[in-house]
Amino acid sequence: MAATRRIAPRPSLRIAAGITAAAACAAALAGCGTDAPQHQGAPGPKEAAAPHKGAPGSVLRLIGDGSTAYTGRQPHLPRADRLEAGQKPPQFVVFSWDGAGEDSQKLFSHFRKVAKKNNATMTYFLSGVYMLPEDKAGEYHAPQHSPGRSDIGFNDLKGIKDTAEQVRGAWLEGNEIGTHFNGHFCGKDGGVGQWSVAEWKSEIAQAKSFVKSWKTNTGLKKAAPLPFDYDKELIGARTPCLEGQKNFMRAAHDLGFRYDTSGVNNQVWPTKKDGLWDLSMQLVPFLGHSYEQLTMDYNFAVNQSGTMHGDPARHAYWGNQMRDSLLAGFNRAYKGNRAPLIIGNHFESWNGGTYMRAVEQTVERVCNKPDVRCVSFHQLADWLDAQDAGTLRKLAELPVGKAPGQGWPAFLNGGGPAPAPKGVPGAPAAKS
Protein backbone atom coordinates (compact mmCIF):
# COMPACT_ATOMS: atom_id res chain seq x y z
CA MET A 1 0.00 0.00 0.00
CA ALA A 2 1.31 3.41 -0.87
CA ALA A 3 2.34 5.73 1.93
CA THR A 4 0.25 8.87 2.28
CA ARG A 5 0.45 12.04 4.32
CA ARG A 6 -2.39 13.09 6.60
CA ILE A 7 -2.09 16.50 8.15
CA ALA A 8 -4.49 18.34 10.42
CA PRO A 9 -5.16 21.95 9.50
CA ARG A 10 -4.30 25.24 11.04
CA PRO A 11 -7.71 26.84 11.72
CA SER A 12 -8.64 30.16 10.16
CA LEU A 13 -11.49 31.09 12.49
CA ARG A 14 -12.21 34.77 11.93
CA ILE A 15 -13.26 35.87 15.41
CA ALA A 16 -12.00 39.41 15.00
CA ALA A 17 -10.27 41.59 12.49
CA GLY A 18 -7.05 41.04 14.40
CA ILE A 19 -7.07 37.29 13.72
CA THR A 20 -5.08 36.48 10.63
CA ALA A 21 -5.91 33.83 8.08
CA ALA A 22 -3.99 30.64 8.68
CA ALA A 23 -1.35 29.25 6.44
CA ALA A 24 -1.27 25.70 5.14
CA CYS A 25 0.06 22.96 7.41
CA ALA A 26 3.32 21.22 6.90
CA ALA A 27 3.39 18.16 9.15
CA ALA A 28 2.94 14.59 8.00
CA LEU A 29 1.63 11.36 9.47
CA ALA A 30 2.22 7.99 7.87
CA GLY A 31 -0.73 5.96 6.67
CA CYS A 32 -1.85 3.51 4.02
CA GLY A 33 -3.94 3.80 0.89
CA THR A 34 -4.17 2.34 -2.58
CA ASP A 35 -4.38 5.20 -5.05
CA ALA A 36 -4.54 7.78 -2.29
CA PRO A 37 -3.19 11.30 -2.93
CA GLN A 38 -1.51 13.41 -0.28
CA HIS A 39 -3.86 13.78 2.71
CA GLN A 40 -3.55 17.31 4.08
CA GLY A 41 -4.95 18.12 7.31
CA ALA A 42 -5.39 16.97 9.23
CA PRO A 43 -14.59 20.02 45.93
CA GLY A 44 -14.76 21.20 49.04
CA PRO A 45 -15.17 24.82 47.99
CA LYS A 46 -17.02 27.35 50.06
CA GLU A 47 -20.66 27.53 49.03
CA ALA A 48 -22.55 30.68 48.10
CA ALA A 49 -25.63 31.63 46.14
CA ALA A 50 -25.92 30.11 42.68
CA PRO A 51 -26.61 32.75 40.02
CA HIS A 52 -26.24 30.45 37.02
CA LYS A 53 -29.45 29.75 35.25
CA GLY A 54 -29.40 26.18 34.00
CA ALA A 55 -27.38 24.85 36.93
CA PRO A 56 -30.00 24.44 39.66
CA GLY A 57 -28.65 23.62 43.06
CA SER A 58 -25.13 24.65 42.14
CA VAL A 59 -22.79 26.58 44.38
CA LEU A 60 -20.59 29.49 43.43
CA ARG A 61 -16.98 30.02 44.40
CA LEU A 62 -15.12 32.51 42.28
CA ILE A 63 -11.62 31.47 41.28
CA GLY A 64 -8.81 33.99 40.91
CA ASP A 65 -10.09 37.20 39.36
CA GLY A 66 -13.57 35.73 38.82
CA SER A 67 -13.00 34.70 35.21
CA THR A 68 -13.92 31.15 36.26
CA ALA A 69 -15.83 29.72 39.20
CA TYR A 70 -16.57 26.45 40.90
CA THR A 71 -20.33 25.85 40.60
CA GLY A 72 -20.65 22.19 41.49
CA ARG A 73 -20.86 19.09 39.36
CA GLN A 74 -21.45 19.77 35.70
CA PRO A 75 -25.15 19.64 34.73
CA HIS A 76 -26.24 17.05 32.19
CA LEU A 77 -23.05 15.00 32.56
CA PRO A 78 -24.32 11.44 33.09
CA ARG A 79 -22.44 8.92 35.15
CA ALA A 80 -21.01 6.16 33.02
CA ASP A 81 -22.70 2.77 33.06
CA ARG A 82 -20.79 -0.50 32.93
CA LEU A 83 -21.61 -3.14 30.35
CA GLU A 84 -23.30 -6.20 31.72
CA ALA A 85 -22.13 -9.66 30.73
CA GLY A 86 -23.04 -10.30 27.10
CA GLN A 87 -24.41 -6.80 26.54
CA LYS A 88 -23.87 -5.21 23.15
CA PRO A 89 -21.95 -1.95 23.55
CA PRO A 90 -23.57 1.33 22.56
CA GLN A 91 -22.40 3.13 19.45
CA PHE A 92 -20.54 6.24 20.54
CA VAL A 93 -20.03 9.19 18.19
CA VAL A 94 -17.91 12.19 19.14
CA PHE A 95 -18.23 15.50 17.29
CA SER A 96 -15.43 17.89 18.21
CA TRP A 97 -14.38 21.39 17.18
CA ASP A 98 -10.82 22.72 16.92
CA GLY A 99 -10.15 26.30 17.99
CA ALA A 100 -13.75 26.83 19.06
CA GLY A 101 -14.88 30.45 19.27
CA GLU A 102 -17.84 32.63 18.33
CA ASP A 103 -17.43 35.10 15.48
CA SER A 104 -19.80 36.79 13.03
CA GLN A 105 -20.70 33.42 11.48
CA LYS A 106 -22.20 32.36 14.85
CA LEU A 107 -21.41 28.71 14.22
CA PHE A 108 -20.62 27.93 17.86
CA SER A 109 -24.09 29.05 18.94
CA HIS A 110 -25.66 27.31 15.96
CA PHE A 111 -24.14 23.92 16.69
CA ARG A 112 -25.09 24.19 20.35
CA LYS A 113 -28.68 24.32 19.10
CA VAL A 114 -28.07 21.43 16.71
CA ALA A 115 -26.66 19.34 19.56
CA LYS A 116 -29.57 20.06 21.92
CA LYS A 117 -32.12 19.30 19.21
CA ASN A 118 -30.52 15.92 18.52
CA ASN A 119 -29.78 14.70 22.05
CA ALA A 120 -26.05 15.22 21.60
CA THR A 121 -23.16 16.71 23.52
CA MET A 122 -19.88 17.73 21.91
CA THR A 123 -16.31 18.75 22.70
CA TYR A 124 -15.16 22.31 22.05
CA PHE A 125 -11.37 22.77 21.92
CA LEU A 126 -10.94 26.41 22.92
CA SER A 127 -7.83 28.24 21.73
CA GLY A 128 -6.39 30.24 24.63
CA VAL A 129 -5.53 33.26 22.49
CA TYR A 130 -9.22 33.58 21.57
CA MET A 131 -9.63 34.80 25.19
CA LEU A 132 -6.72 37.25 24.96
CA PRO A 133 -7.21 40.74 23.45
CA GLU A 134 -4.80 41.90 20.82
CA ASP A 135 -3.52 44.76 22.97
CA LYS A 136 -2.33 42.14 25.48
CA ALA A 137 -0.64 39.96 22.87
CA GLY A 138 2.70 40.41 24.64
CA GLU A 139 1.38 38.28 27.49
CA TYR A 140 1.78 35.22 25.26
CA HIS A 141 5.27 33.73 25.13
CA ALA A 142 5.06 30.85 22.69
CA PRO A 143 7.86 28.30 22.87
CA GLN A 144 10.59 29.06 20.33
CA HIS A 145 8.91 32.34 19.30
CA SER A 146 9.14 35.96 20.34
CA PRO A 147 6.53 37.35 22.78
CA GLY A 148 3.24 38.37 21.17
CA ARG A 149 3.58 36.00 18.20
CA SER A 150 0.59 33.88 17.11
CA ASP A 151 -0.15 32.33 13.75
CA ILE A 152 -3.89 32.76 14.33
CA GLY A 153 -3.72 36.24 15.83
CA PHE A 154 -5.66 37.28 18.91
CA ASN A 155 -9.17 38.59 19.62
CA ASP A 156 -11.10 41.79 20.32
CA LEU A 157 -13.43 42.53 23.25
CA LYS A 158 -16.62 41.59 21.41
CA GLY A 159 -15.11 38.32 20.21
CA ILE A 160 -13.97 37.42 23.73
CA LYS A 161 -17.32 38.37 25.27
CA ASP A 162 -19.24 36.35 22.66
CA THR A 163 -16.94 33.37 22.98
CA ALA A 164 -17.21 33.40 26.78
CA GLU A 165 -21.00 33.41 26.44
CA GLN A 166 -20.90 30.34 24.22
CA VAL A 167 -18.35 28.48 26.37
CA ARG A 168 -20.46 29.20 29.46
CA GLY A 169 -23.68 27.98 27.85
CA ALA A 170 -22.06 24.94 26.26
CA TRP A 171 -20.65 23.69 29.57
CA LEU A 172 -23.98 24.16 31.36
CA GLU A 173 -25.58 22.02 28.65
CA GLY A 174 -23.18 19.14 29.38
CA ASN A 175 -20.61 19.81 26.64
CA GLU A 176 -16.87 19.61 27.22
CA ILE A 177 -14.38 22.48 27.03
CA GLY A 178 -10.95 21.21 25.99
CA THR A 179 -8.01 23.14 24.55
CA HIS A 180 -6.43 23.68 21.15
CA PHE A 181 -3.58 25.52 22.92
CA ASN A 182 -2.63 28.98 21.66
CA GLY A 183 -0.67 30.21 18.65
CA HIS A 184 -1.17 27.20 16.38
CA PHE A 185 2.39 26.91 15.13
CA CYS A 186 3.03 24.15 12.60
CA GLY A 187 5.98 23.07 10.50
CA LYS A 188 9.72 23.14 11.13
CA ASP A 189 10.10 26.82 12.05
CA GLY A 190 9.37 26.56 15.76
CA GLY A 191 6.32 24.41 15.16
CA VAL A 192 4.75 22.33 17.90
CA GLY A 193 6.37 19.22 16.47
CA GLN A 194 9.72 20.63 17.63
CA TRP A 195 8.66 21.40 21.20
CA SER A 196 10.07 19.67 24.26
CA VAL A 197 7.99 18.30 27.12
CA ALA A 198 8.84 21.40 29.17
CA GLU A 199 7.78 23.68 26.31
CA TRP A 200 4.47 21.85 26.00
CA LYS A 201 3.91 22.35 29.72
CA SER A 202 4.51 26.07 29.26
CA GLU A 203 2.05 26.22 26.36
CA ILE A 204 -0.60 24.36 28.36
CA ALA A 205 -0.08 26.60 31.39
CA GLN A 206 -0.54 29.68 29.22
CA ALA A 207 -3.65 28.31 27.55
CA LYS A 208 -5.14 27.75 31.00
CA SER A 209 -4.01 31.18 32.18
CA PHE A 210 -5.72 33.08 29.36
CA VAL A 211 -9.01 31.31 30.12
CA LYS A 212 -8.61 31.85 33.86
CA SER A 213 -7.79 35.57 33.54
CA TRP A 214 -9.87 36.83 30.62
CA LYS A 215 -11.66 39.36 32.85
CA THR A 216 -8.40 40.97 33.94
CA ASN A 217 -7.06 41.03 30.40
CA THR A 218 -10.24 42.55 28.95
CA GLY A 219 -11.50 44.72 31.78
CA LEU A 220 -14.90 43.00 31.54
CA LYS A 221 -15.12 42.76 35.33
CA LYS A 222 -18.94 42.62 35.50
CA ALA A 223 -19.30 39.72 33.07
CA ALA A 224 -20.45 36.34 34.39
CA PRO A 225 -17.67 33.86 35.10
CA LEU A 226 -17.14 30.66 33.21
CA PRO A 227 -18.90 28.16 35.53
CA PHE A 228 -16.06 25.66 35.95
CA ASP A 229 -12.61 25.24 37.43
CA TYR A 230 -10.53 24.98 34.26
CA ASP A 231 -7.69 23.18 36.04
CA LYS A 232 -10.14 20.34 36.69
CA GLU A 233 -12.28 20.69 33.55
CA LEU A 234 -9.37 20.43 31.14
CA ILE A 235 -8.62 16.74 30.59
CA GLY A 236 -7.79 16.47 26.88
CA ALA A 237 -6.75 18.19 23.68
CA ARG A 238 -5.90 17.98 20.00
CA THR A 239 -2.56 19.38 18.87
CA PRO A 240 -2.25 21.83 15.97
CA CYS A 241 -1.84 20.03 12.66
CA LEU A 242 -1.62 16.75 14.61
CA GLU A 243 2.04 17.54 15.25
CA GLY A 244 4.06 17.13 18.44
CA GLN A 245 1.89 14.35 19.84
CA LYS A 246 4.70 12.35 21.46
CA ASN A 247 6.04 15.10 23.73
CA PHE A 248 2.61 16.59 24.27
CA MET A 249 1.34 13.27 25.61
CA ARG A 250 4.26 13.06 28.03
CA ALA A 251 3.45 16.55 29.29
CA ALA A 252 -0.28 15.80 29.38
CA HIS A 253 0.28 12.63 31.39
CA ASP A 254 2.35 14.54 33.95
CA LEU A 255 -0.41 17.18 34.20
CA GLY A 256 -3.18 14.66 34.77
CA PHE A 257 -4.86 14.74 31.37
CA ARG A 258 -6.98 11.71 30.54
CA TYR A 259 -7.00 11.53 26.73
CA ASP A 260 -5.45 12.77 23.51
CA THR A 261 -7.09 13.04 20.09
CA SER A 262 -4.12 14.18 18.00
CA GLY A 263 -3.59 11.02 15.98
CA VAL A 264 -5.00 9.09 13.04
CA ASN A 265 -6.39 5.59 13.51
CA ASN A 266 -8.67 3.01 11.96
CA GLN A 267 -12.18 2.43 13.28
CA VAL A 268 -11.21 0.21 16.19
CA TRP A 269 -11.81 0.39 19.93
CA PRO A 270 -9.55 2.81 21.83
CA THR A 271 -6.69 1.69 24.02
CA LYS A 272 -4.42 3.63 26.35
CA LYS A 273 -1.16 5.07 25.10
CA ASP A 274 1.36 6.49 27.56
CA GLY A 275 -1.34 6.46 30.22
CA LEU A 276 -3.87 8.45 28.15
CA TRP A 277 -6.84 7.20 26.18
CA ASP A 278 -5.91 7.35 22.50
CA LEU A 279 -9.07 8.86 21.01
CA SER A 280 -7.61 9.61 17.61
CA MET A 281 -9.64 10.71 14.64
CA GLN A 282 -10.30 7.92 12.20
CA LEU A 283 -10.24 6.84 8.59
CA VAL A 284 -13.60 6.17 6.96
CA PRO A 285 -14.56 5.11 3.43
CA PHE A 286 -14.16 8.05 1.02
CA LEU A 287 -17.06 7.44 -1.31
CA GLY A 288 -16.08 7.62 -4.95
CA HIS A 289 -12.47 6.71 -4.15
CA SER A 290 -10.56 3.53 -3.34
CA TYR A 291 -8.79 5.00 -0.31
CA GLU A 292 -10.03 6.11 3.09
CA GLN A 293 -10.36 9.64 4.38
CA LEU A 294 -9.69 11.26 7.76
CA THR A 295 -12.86 12.33 9.58
CA MET A 296 -12.14 16.05 9.45
CA ASP A 297 -13.74 18.79 7.36
CA TYR A 298 -10.39 20.28 6.34
CA ASN A 299 -9.15 17.00 4.92
CA PHE A 300 -12.25 16.60 2.80
CA ALA A 301 -11.80 20.13 1.45
CA VAL A 302 -8.17 19.56 0.51
CA ASN A 303 -8.80 16.19 -1.12
CA GLN A 304 -11.84 17.46 -3.00
CA SER A 305 -10.83 20.92 -4.19
CA GLY A 306 -7.29 21.60 -3.02
CA THR A 307 -8.52 24.95 -1.78
CA MET A 308 -11.02 26.39 0.68
CA HIS A 309 -12.67 28.34 -2.14
CA GLY A 310 -13.36 25.78 -4.85
CA ASP A 311 -15.85 25.81 -7.71
CA PRO A 312 -19.27 26.84 -6.30
CA ALA A 313 -20.95 24.45 -8.72
CA ARG A 314 -19.26 21.58 -6.86
CA HIS A 315 -20.06 22.69 -3.29
CA ALA A 316 -23.24 20.66 -2.91
CA TYR A 317 -21.56 17.53 -4.31
CA TRP A 318 -18.58 17.87 -1.97
CA GLY A 319 -20.81 18.37 1.07
CA ASN A 320 -22.91 15.33 0.18
CA GLN A 321 -19.75 13.31 -0.35
CA MET A 322 -18.44 14.22 3.11
CA ARG A 323 -21.79 13.48 4.76
CA ASP A 324 -22.18 10.15 3.00
CA SER A 325 -18.58 9.16 3.78
CA LEU A 326 -19.10 9.91 7.48
CA LEU A 327 -22.35 7.94 7.37
CA ALA A 328 -20.54 5.04 5.70
CA GLY A 329 -18.03 5.03 8.54
CA PHE A 330 -20.83 5.23 11.08
CA ASN A 331 -22.75 2.33 9.55
CA ARG A 332 -19.60 0.22 9.31
CA ALA A 333 -19.11 0.57 13.08
CA TYR A 334 -22.81 0.52 14.05
CA LYS A 335 -23.40 -2.77 12.25
CA GLY A 336 -19.90 -4.08 12.98
CA ASN A 337 -17.50 -3.73 15.90
CA ARG A 338 -19.28 -0.73 17.49
CA ALA A 339 -16.00 1.18 17.76
CA PRO A 340 -16.58 4.82 18.71
CA LEU A 341 -16.60 7.14 15.69
CA ILE A 342 -14.38 10.21 16.25
CA ILE A 343 -15.00 13.28 14.06
CA GLY A 344 -13.10 16.59 14.01
CA ASN A 345 -14.24 19.92 12.60
CA HIS A 346 -13.72 23.69 12.49
CA PHE A 347 -16.22 26.54 12.70
CA GLU A 348 -15.58 27.59 9.12
CA SER A 349 -17.28 28.36 5.81
CA TRP A 350 -14.88 26.52 3.54
CA ASN A 351 -16.29 25.86 0.08
CA GLY A 352 -19.38 27.87 0.83
CA GLY A 353 -20.09 26.25 4.20
CA THR A 354 -20.83 22.89 2.63
CA TYR A 355 -18.93 21.00 5.34
CA MET A 356 -20.96 22.64 8.11
CA ARG A 357 -24.08 21.40 6.33
CA ALA A 358 -22.56 17.92 6.02
CA VAL A 359 -21.75 17.75 9.74
CA GLU A 360 -25.19 19.01 10.74
CA GLN A 361 -26.91 16.44 8.56
CA THR A 362 -24.69 13.70 9.98
CA VAL A 363 -25.65 14.72 13.53
CA GLU A 364 -29.33 14.61 12.56
CA ARG A 365 -29.07 11.20 10.93
CA VAL A 366 -27.02 9.31 13.51
CA CYS A 367 -27.64 10.80 16.97
CA ASN A 368 -31.29 9.76 17.16
CA LYS A 369 -30.78 6.11 16.24
CA PRO A 370 -31.29 3.30 18.78
CA ASP A 371 -28.22 2.49 20.89
CA VAL A 372 -26.37 5.58 19.66
CA ARG A 373 -24.79 8.04 22.07
CA CYS A 374 -23.41 11.28 20.64
CA VAL A 375 -21.08 12.36 23.44
CA SER A 376 -18.07 14.46 24.32
CA PHE A 377 -14.59 13.00 24.74
CA HIS A 378 -15.05 13.52 28.50
CA GLN A 379 -18.11 11.24 28.49
CA LEU A 380 -16.41 8.65 26.31
CA ALA A 381 -13.35 8.59 28.58
CA ASP A 382 -15.65 8.21 31.61
CA TRP A 383 -17.36 5.24 29.97
CA LEU A 384 -14.09 3.58 29.02
CA ASP A 385 -12.75 4.02 32.55
CA ALA A 386 -15.92 2.41 33.94
CA GLN A 387 -15.53 -0.82 31.97
CA ASP A 388 -13.98 -4.09 33.02
CA ALA A 389 -10.43 -4.32 31.67
CA GLY A 390 -11.09 -7.75 30.17
CA THR A 391 -14.11 -6.44 28.29
CA LEU A 392 -12.08 -3.62 26.78
CA ARG A 393 -9.35 -6.04 25.71
CA LYS A 394 -11.91 -8.19 23.90
CA LEU A 395 -13.46 -5.17 22.18
CA ALA A 396 -10.03 -4.02 21.01
CA GLU A 397 -9.53 -7.39 19.28
CA LEU A 398 -12.38 -6.73 16.85
CA PRO A 399 -11.25 -5.71 13.34
CA VAL A 400 -12.68 -2.72 11.51
CA GLY A 401 -16.34 -3.24 10.69
CA LYS A 402 -16.48 -6.78 12.08
CA ALA A 403 -19.08 -7.78 14.66
CA PRO A 404 -18.32 -10.90 16.75
CA GLY A 405 -18.97 -13.98 14.64
CA GLN A 406 -20.59 -15.79 17.56
CA GLY A 407 -22.77 -12.79 18.45
CA TRP A 408 -22.38 -10.20 21.18
CA PRO A 409 -23.85 -12.23 24.08
CA ALA A 410 -21.38 -15.07 23.56
CA PHE A 411 -18.46 -12.73 22.80
CA LEU A 412 -18.83 -10.64 25.94
CA ASN A 413 -20.25 -13.28 28.27
CA GLY A 414 -17.48 -14.29 30.61
CA GLY A 415 -19.45 -14.35 33.78
CA GLY A 416 -19.53 -10.58 33.65
CA PRO A 417 -17.85 -7.96 35.79
CA ALA A 418 -19.34 -6.94 39.09
CA PRO A 419 -21.51 -3.83 38.88
CA ALA A 420 -19.85 -0.57 39.86
CA PRO A 421 -20.67 0.67 43.35
CA LYS A 422 -23.20 3.47 43.47
CA GLY A 423 -21.88 6.98 43.59
CA VAL A 424 -18.65 6.38 41.69
CA PRO A 425 -17.82 6.85 38.01
CA GLY A 426 -19.15 3.88 36.12
CA ALA A 427 -22.35 3.54 38.11
CA PRO A 428 -25.62 4.33 36.37
CA ALA A 429 -27.10 7.67 37.35
CA ALA A 430 -29.68 7.48 40.10
CA LYS A 431 -33.24 7.77 38.87
CA SER A 432 -35.01 10.87 40.06
Image (cartoon, helix red, strand yellow):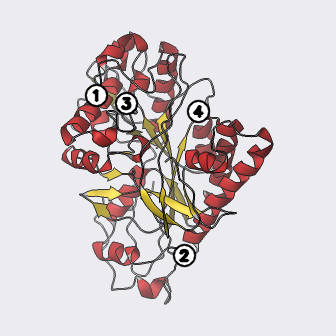
**x and y, in percent, of residue 306 in the image:** 63, 44
Q: Which mark is residue 182?
A: 3
- At label 1, the amino acid type is Gln
Q: Is residue 250 above or below residue 192?
A: below
Of circles 3 and 4, which is in front? 3
Which mark is nearer the camera, 3 or 2?
Answer: 3
Tag 3 near tag 1, CB within 8 Å: yes
Can you see residue 384? yes
Quick one: label 2, few (<14), some, or many (20+) residues within 10 Å? some
Secondary structure category for the residue under label 2: loop
Q: How would you rate the neighbour count of disc 1 (Cα within 10 Å): few for under 14, some for 14-19, many for 20 or more? A: many
Q: Is residue 424 visible?
A: no
How many angstroms separate mark 4 from mark 2 (CA)? 34 Å
Q: Residues within 10 Å of mark 3 (few under 14, many from 20)?
A: many
Q: Earlier in the sequence, mark 1 or mark 2?
A: 1
The residues bearing labels 1 and 2 have C-alpha atoms spaced at a distance of 42 Å
The local secondary structure at tag 1 comes to: helix
Q: Which residue is mark 4?
A: 109
- What is the x, y in percent for residue 219? 38, 9
* Label 4 to label 1: alpha-carbon separation: 26 Å
Residue hosting label 1: 206
Q: Earlier in the sequence, mark 4 or mark 2?
A: 4
